[in-house]
C-alpha cells in the first residue's frame, strides 16, 4: 500500500513538472470590458517566471463635466490546460480617482478610492505574437465612487514580445 501511494505521488509530481509553461515575457494590449464604467483599459503583463506574472491596467474616462482614472495591479498564477490554452487566477487591487464639476447641476466633487480585486480567466497563446483572453474580475471598492462588489467580464487582446 505504501509503495502504491509513493509511486502515485512520484507520477503526479512528474506530471506537474513536465507541463512546461510558455508565457511571454511581456504582453501589452487592451482589456475590453465594463471596468466599473471605465470601459477599455490599457493592459500590460510582465512574466516573473514560467508560471507567475504581474498584470497592470490603466483606464480613464473624460467628458465635459467628468474625468476619472483607474489603475489596477494583479499577481497571477498561470497554469496550462491543453496545447496553447492556459487558465489563470490572480489577486490584487488598485485605485480610482474621479472629479465631477457640473456647475448647472450644482455638483462639484472629487475623490480617490481603493479597491481589491480577484481574477480568473482563460487565454489562448497563438503561434504568432497574439494573446487572447477572457476573464472574470470581481472587485470590492472602498469609498463613495466604488463602494460595493462589482463583477467585470472582459476580453483581452495583447501583443506579446
Image (cartoon, rainbow, N blue to C red):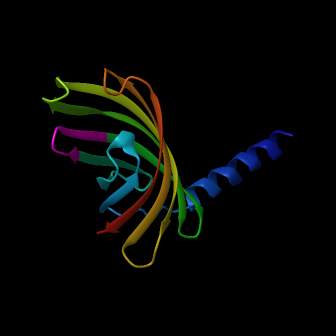
- Residue 84 point in image, percent of width and height: 53, 69
Image quarter for residue 67? Answer: top left
Q: Residue at x 15, y 44 (%)?
A: 64
Magenta-drawn stretch, dominant element (helix, strand or loop):
strand
- Would residue 57 appear left or right of 106 to someone viewing this image? right
Q: Residue at x 81, y 44 (%)?
A: 3
Image quarter for residue 93? Answer: top left
- Residue 128 point in image, percent of width and height: 40, 79
Indicate whether residue 63 is drawn in magenta. yes
Q: Quadrant of the C terminus?
A: bottom left
Indicate whether residue 118 is drawn in magenta. no
Q: Quadrant of the N terminus?
A: top right
- Residue 109 point in image, percent of width and height: 17, 24
Q: How many marks?
A: 0
Viewer-proximal residue, 146 or 7?
146
Viewer-proximal residue, 105 or 84?
105
Viewer-proximal residue, 157 or 123?
157
Q: Residue furthest front?
A: 104
Amino acid at each position: 500500500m505504501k509503495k502504491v501511494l509513493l509511486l502515485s505521488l512520484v507520477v503526479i509530481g512528474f506530471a506537474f513538472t513536465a507541463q512546461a509553461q510558455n508565457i511571454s515575457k511581456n504582453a501589452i494590449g487592451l482589456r475590453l470590458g465594463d471596468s466599473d464604467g471605465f470601459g477599455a483599459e490599457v493592459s500590460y503583463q510582465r512574466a516573473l517566471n514560467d508560471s507567475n506574472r504581474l498584470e497592470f491596467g490603466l483606464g480613464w474616462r473624460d467628458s465635459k463635466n467628468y474625468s476619472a482614472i483607474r489603475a489596477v495591479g494583479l499577481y497571477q498564477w498561470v497554469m496550462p490546460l491543453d496545447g496553447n490554452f492556459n487558465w489563470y487566477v490572480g489577486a490584487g487591487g488598485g485605485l480610482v480617482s474621479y472629479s465631477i464639476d457640473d456647475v448647472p447641476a450644482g455638483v462639484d466633487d472629487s475623490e480617490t478610492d481603493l479597491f481589491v480585486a480577484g481574477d480568473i480567466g482563460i487565454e489562448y497563446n497563438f503561434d504568432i505574437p497574439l494573446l487572447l483572453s477572457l476573464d472574470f474580475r470581481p472587485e470590492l471598492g472602498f469609498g463613495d465612487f466604488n463602494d460595493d462588489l462589482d463583477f467585470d467580464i472582459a476580453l483581452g487582446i495583447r501583443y506579446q514580445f
